[in-house]
Amino acid sequence: MPVHLDTTQDGFDAAFAALLSAKREDDADVGDAVAAILRDVRARGDAAVLELTARFDRLDLTPETMRVSEGEIDAATAAVTAPERAALELAAARIRAFHEAQVPEDRMWTDDTGARLGWRWTPVDAAGLYVPGGLASYPSSVLMNAIPARVAGVRRLVMCVPTPDGATNPLVLCAARLAGVDEVYRVGGAQAIAAMAYGTDTIAPVDVVTGPGNAYVAAAKRQVYGRVGIDMVAGPSEILVIADHTADPDWVAVDLLSQAEHDPVAQSILVTPDAALARAVSDAVDRRLQTLARADIAGAAWRDYGATVVARDLEEAAALSDRIAPEHLELCVEDPDALSDRIRHAGAIFLGHWTPEAIGDYVGGPNHVLPTARSARHASGLGTLHFLKRTTLAAMTPESLRAIGPAAVTLATSESLEAHGLSVQARLDRLNG
């Protein structure tokens, strides 16, 4: 059963700590298996990718058929209904506008010594986007990963999407076309991450790999980090709702279930100062589970990892939220802006009764690829900056070098780095000669 806690009760701190430390990631020890796959793809390239695809996806490919042809993408796009395409286009436009606002500015200035200093931003050359495959795949993830990369100015966008038994979701290919993906490959799993990171004869390597996946994909991204950049290593989905007496219990219930239906190990938590609301929401969840199509998944997540927490007040609720550092945080309260000002750690915040988290999954504009497992304490969601690099610029004049160079020589000497000091001193000697 879900956990029901009250901050005023004895034993709350221990029970809350247990809630935070509950292990929800896949228990399978996949690290060694993934390392073997990465080594195999790095050594044998296409041959390894093809063998692994046949084994795991039951799909026999050749180097010529790994890539989804433009004709196949045309056919898939044509198969998408007009309402679905219109919805994708609306989502794409809103996501693009939001991420265009994130593009940082180059800057250059002259300081009081006459030195010119600054920075400039440049995109990576190529990005690899991983999208979970099959008929249950998510076109929204294509838009959320590809559009920020294109906005950043990435020249080449590669997408890998597994197609078990050859099953392809037309919406995924339509979304790839709308978002400007250049190459789509029907390979998945750790072998897809390896192919994008190391390159094969067919799939040229990329600079950054982003996108969600299963435990094998997450482990592969963790292991190739350094060879390529990654967005994050994401775990199961999670949502925290802070609600007060003004909230509709049924709305809160379906919001909690919107994440629970993702995965049996997803986590949904309600924190409220209203004990009656906590009971009403719990009852509403039970009623909704009677008719929900994915009740087996959502019910397992709510039973094993769900929780309601009764806090003394909204101030304490905010403090508890920061300890959780949730992926998604809904503020279903009378004054959400005031409460939001008290929140320091959250992947994304949804303000007010009319802003369900699900709107952010599709058409809100902000990215839905967000830090999980309390990593919002130190990480941000996917955005334009993930595909950009900042290069600093510095230009000394004789006058500025004369002003600050002696300090550099002193520090180099203190670190016993003689050539460092000499490289500056030689110029100072010329100036003082």
Image: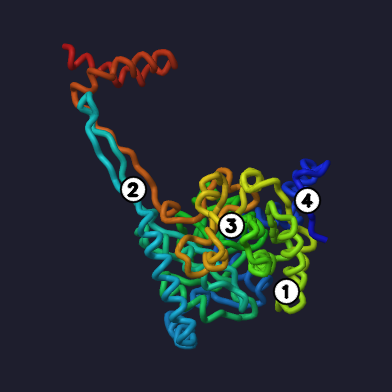
Mark 1 sits on what residue?
Answer: 288
Pair 3/2: label in front: 3
Amino acid at dot 2: Trp
- Residue 402 locus on image (x, y percent): 22, 18
- Residue 112 locus on image (x, y percent): 22, 25
Amino acid at dot 4: Leu
Mark 3 sits on what residue?
Answer: 333
State how far apart marks 3 and 2 are (Cα): 40 Å
State how far apart marks 3 and 1 are (Cα): 22 Å
Say which quarter of the image contains residue 242. Answer: bottom right
- Which residue shows up at 43% across the image and 81% down it? 86
- In depth, the one of 37 and 131 nearer the eye is 131
Say which quarter of the image contains residue 400. Answer: top left
Q: Secondary structure at mark 3?
A: loop
State how far apart marks 4 and 1 are (Cα): 22 Å
Mark 4 sits on what residue?
Answer: 5
Mark 2 sits on what residue?
Answer: 121
Of the residues under marks 3 and 1, which one precedes in the sequence?
Answer: 1
- Which residue shows up at 30% across the image and 21% down it? 423
Quadrant placement of the N terminus: bottom right
Pair 2/1: label in front: 1
Quadrant placement of the C terminus: top left
Of the residues under marks 4 and 1, which one precedes in the sequence?
Answer: 4
